[in-house]
């Protein structure tokens, strides 16, 4: 596969263009060079990006692939005009125009998902969820756990923190996470602060070999990172979760997005409906 460059061009953050574009590109066995160009909200900025695209085509001898989410027609026309040297994939026109025809109405042509953030209750909810998740990371606080939408449990370094933050940032979920430690296994019982909130708990586990690898990066050569210790902790954690009736899954081969969607499905299915 020849070297190719992919541009993600947007008049907002570019998150939509990049997320959708990467989903499409994942269907092909290639590792293109990614170029992100957010906040392209004027004709002058568009021409700067257009020159960059054309220069890339000249230098590489292949058309760059250009995913765009540009609402302003003047800005969009600079990037997508006929003499452009990139393969331009316009997500706005592809989806919005057929919907306008189907619904019999014009879209509001709003720039960006977050343009009205100051007036958005949903945005405020996400910020509150992020603050909650940070305050309740790794068992830092057991206060207000009754306000949590979900409490992730599992051994150290199994993926609880990134999953909690993803749930907060993307879905406005107040996600606490609480580590299961050797002392919990010696007592052979669930940590006391979690007992009243068992129904909100969701467990993460991980293959011991992968866990040992992750822990060695943090504390090389330690008992904490030894394969024997990782096997014992994972086995004890899974036994506890099974005994307490806590749903759980392995994070070993799953993306954060897959883990988060499974949690929403099992704990907060209402959040899968917008």
Image: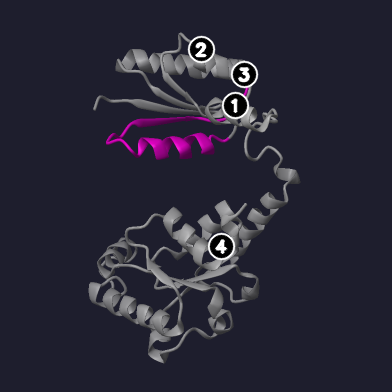
> Residue at (63%, 27%) from the top-left corner?
101
Q: Nearer the viewer, mark 4 or mark 3?
A: 4
Q: Is residue 215 above or below residue 61?
A: below
The residue lying toward the viewer, choosing from 237 and 20, is: 20
- Graded by Cα atoms within 10 Å as few (under 14), some (14 to 19) or many (20 or more), the crowding at tag 2 reads few
- Graded by Cα atoms within 10 Å as few (under 14), some (14 to 19) or many (20 or more), the crowding at tag 4 reads few
SS class, disc 3: helix
Mark 3 vs 2: CB contact within 8 A = no
Cα gap from disc 4 to disc 3, whole angstroms: 39 Å
The residue beneath circle 2 is 81
Task: Pinpoint residue 13: horizontal percent, then vertical percent.
Answer: 57, 36
> Residue at (33%, 67%) from the top-left corner?
206
Of label 1 and label 3, which has the lower sequence position? 3
> Residue at (31%, 60%) from the top-left corner?
217
Q: What stretch is highlighted in magenta?
A: 13-41
User: Is residue 201 shown to the viewer in this render?
Assistant: yes
SS class, disc 2: loop
Task: Pinpoint residue 20: horizontal percent, then vertical percent.
Answer: 46, 38
Residue 124 within the segment the image draws in magenta: no
Task: Pinpoint residue 214: horizontal percent, then vertical percent.
Answer: 32, 62
**What label does residue 97 carry, if any?**
1
**What label does residue 147 carry, if any?**
none
């Amino acid at each position: 596969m020849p070297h190719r460059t992919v541009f993600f061009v947007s008049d907002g953050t570019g998150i939509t263009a990049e997320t959708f574009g990467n989903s499409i590109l994942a269907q092909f066995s290639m590792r293109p060079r990614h170029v992100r160009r957010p906040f392209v909200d004027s004709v002058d900025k568009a021409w700067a990006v257009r020159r960059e695209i054309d220069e890339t085509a000249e230098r590489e001898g292949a058309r760059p692939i250009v995913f765009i989410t540009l609402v302003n027609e003047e800005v969009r026309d600079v990037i997508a005009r006929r003499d452009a040297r990139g393969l331009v994939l316009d997500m706005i026109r592809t989806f919005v125009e057929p919907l306008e025809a189907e619904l019999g109405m014009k879209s509001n042509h709003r720039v960006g998902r977050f343009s009205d953030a100051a007036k958005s209750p949903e945005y405020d909810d996400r910020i509150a969820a992020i603050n909650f998740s940070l305050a309740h990371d790794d068992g830092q606080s057991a206060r207000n756990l009754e306000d949590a939408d979900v409490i992730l449990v599992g051994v150290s370094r199994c993926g609880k923190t990134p999953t909690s933050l993803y749930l907060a940032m993307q879905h406005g979920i107040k996600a606490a996470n609480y580590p299961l430690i050797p002392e919990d296994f010696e007592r052979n019982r669930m940590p006391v602060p979690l007992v009243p909130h068992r129904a909100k708990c969701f467990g993460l586990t991980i293959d011991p070999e992968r866990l040992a690898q992750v822990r060695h990066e943090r504390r090389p050569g330690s008992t904490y990172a030894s394969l024997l210790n990782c096997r014992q902790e994972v086995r004890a954690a899974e036994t506890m979760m099974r005994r307490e009736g806590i749903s759980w899954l392995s994070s070993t081969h799953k993306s954060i997005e897959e883990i988060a969607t499974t949690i929403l499905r099992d704990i907060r299915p209402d959040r899968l409906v917008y």
